Image: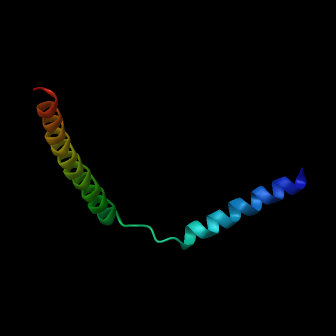
């Protein structure tokens, strides 16, 4: 049981050490990235909804003679 405990302890310590090495974004960088992601999601949604409507109408036109 002691070997498993030691491995867990080593894992946690190494993880904490790596977390200290990480460069974390500033509040402004995080805000800008979040806005960028939301804008990209909105644009993608509008684009895909438009394509969906075009294809839906094309299929409906072709299948209702």
Question: Residue sitting at 19 percent across and 52 percent down?
Answer: 43
For the rendered model, the colour scheme is rainbow
Residue 16: name its quadrant. Answer: bottom right
Question: Residue sitting at 11 percent across and 32 percent down?
Answer: 61
- Please provide percent x and percent y for residue 11: 72, 61
Along the viewing direction, whichever of 9 and 45 lies nearer the viewer: 45
- Please provide percent x and percent y for residue 47: 18, 49
Residue 36: name its quadrant. Answer: bottom left
Residue 4 lies, with reference to residue 65, above or below; the image says below
> In screen coordinates, is 3 left or right of 65?
right
Residue 57: name its quadrant. Answer: top left
> In screen coordinates, is 4 left or right of 52?
right
Question: Residue sitting at 22 percent across and 54 percent down?
Answer: 39
Question: Residue sitting at 82 percent across and 54 percent down?
Answer: 5
- Count of marks, rendered view: 0
Along the viewing direction, whichever of 40 and 60 lies nearer the viewer: 60
Residue positioned most to the top: 64
- Please provide percent x and percent y for residue 9: 76, 58
> In screen coordinates, is 20 left or right of 65?
right
- Please provide percent x and percent y for residue 22: 51, 70
Quadrant placement of the C terminus = top left
Along the viewing direction, whichever of 60 and 52 lies nearer the viewer: 60
Residue positioned most to the front: 65
> In screen coordinates, is 24 left or right of 4?
left
Residue 20 lies, with reference to residue 3, above or below; the image says below
């Amino acid at each position: 049981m002691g070997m498993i405990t030691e491995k867990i302890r080593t894992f946690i310590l190494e993880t904490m050490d790596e977390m200290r090495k990480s460069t974390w974004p500033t509040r402004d960088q995080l805000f800008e990235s979040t806005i960028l992601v939301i804008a990209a999601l909105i644009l993608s949604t509008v684009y895909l909804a438009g394509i969906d409507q075009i294809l839906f109408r094309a299929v409906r036109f072709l299948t209702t003679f």
